[in-house]
């Protein structure tokens, strides 16, 4: 893992929290997008060397909705930027890391993503985020 691409933050409403990020903290909005495969609407904010990804649940039974219900709004995951995500997944599995899925899933901005089980990562939900071929 060479760099952190973004930090995912679960919010009840992007519309209600954007004003804080843009006007209070002074970050600029990069994009808002629905990621149907993950049941979320996301907003990416530019925080200099990394991005902040706000995650708003689209349905009450999705993982983000459940996270907010259990733990409230807050930091949800940390995403490493990787290349060749399938190879990274195999390498991690060989090292005994439990992944939350077998195959990468489509993420925001055309990225391919996969998550590491927090039980394998000392309580942190880590994401692998591969944007190779997307100009980044
Ligand atoms: Zn993410």
Image (cartoon, helix red, strand yellow):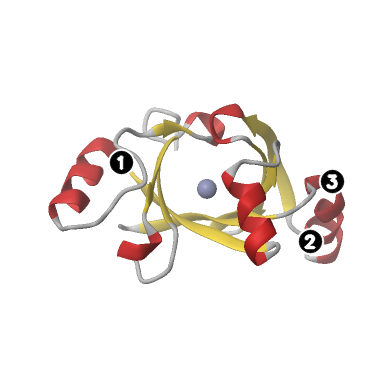
In terms of image quadrants, where is residue 17?
A: bottom right
Answer left or right for 68 relative to 6.
Answer: right
Which residue in the protein does label 2 denote?
Answer: 26
State how far apart marks 1 and 3 are (Cα): 32 Å
Helix, strand or loop status at disc 3: helix
* Residue ID for mark 3: 15
**Residue 43 place in picture, x, y as percent:** 69, 43
Toward the viewer: 12 or 48?
Answer: 12
Element type at marker 2?
loop
Extreme residue in the bottom direction: 122
95 shown above or below 56? below
| Lateral position of residue 114 relative to residue 26, left or right | left
Q: Nearer the viewer, mark 2 or mark 3?
A: 3
Mark 1 or 3 closer to N-term? Answer: 3
Q: Residues within 10 Å of mark 2 (few under 14, many from 20)?
A: few
Find out if the beta carbon at label 2 lies less than 8 Å from the nearest ligand 1 atom.
Answer: no
Mark 3 nearby-residue class (10 Å; few <14, some 14–19, many ≥20): few
**Nearer the N terminus, badge 2 or badge 3?**
3
């Amino acid at each position: 893992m060479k760099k952190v691409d973004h930090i995912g933050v679960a919010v009840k409403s992007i519309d209600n929290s954007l004003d804080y990020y843009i006007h209070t903290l002074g970050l600029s909005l990069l994009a808002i997008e629905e990621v149907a495969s993950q049941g979320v609407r996301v907003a990416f904010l530019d925080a200099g060397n990394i991005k902040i990804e706000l995650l708003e649940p689209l349905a009450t039974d999705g993982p983000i909705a459940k996270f907010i219900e259990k733990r409230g709004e807050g930091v949800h995951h940390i995403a490493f930027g990787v290349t060749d995500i399938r190879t990274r997944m195999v390498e991690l599995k060989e090292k005994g890391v439990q992944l939350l899925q077998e195959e990468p899933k489509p993420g925001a901005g055309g990225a391919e993503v996969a998550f590491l089980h927090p039980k394998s990562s000392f309580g942190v939900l880590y994401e692998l985020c591969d944007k190779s071929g997307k100009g980044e």
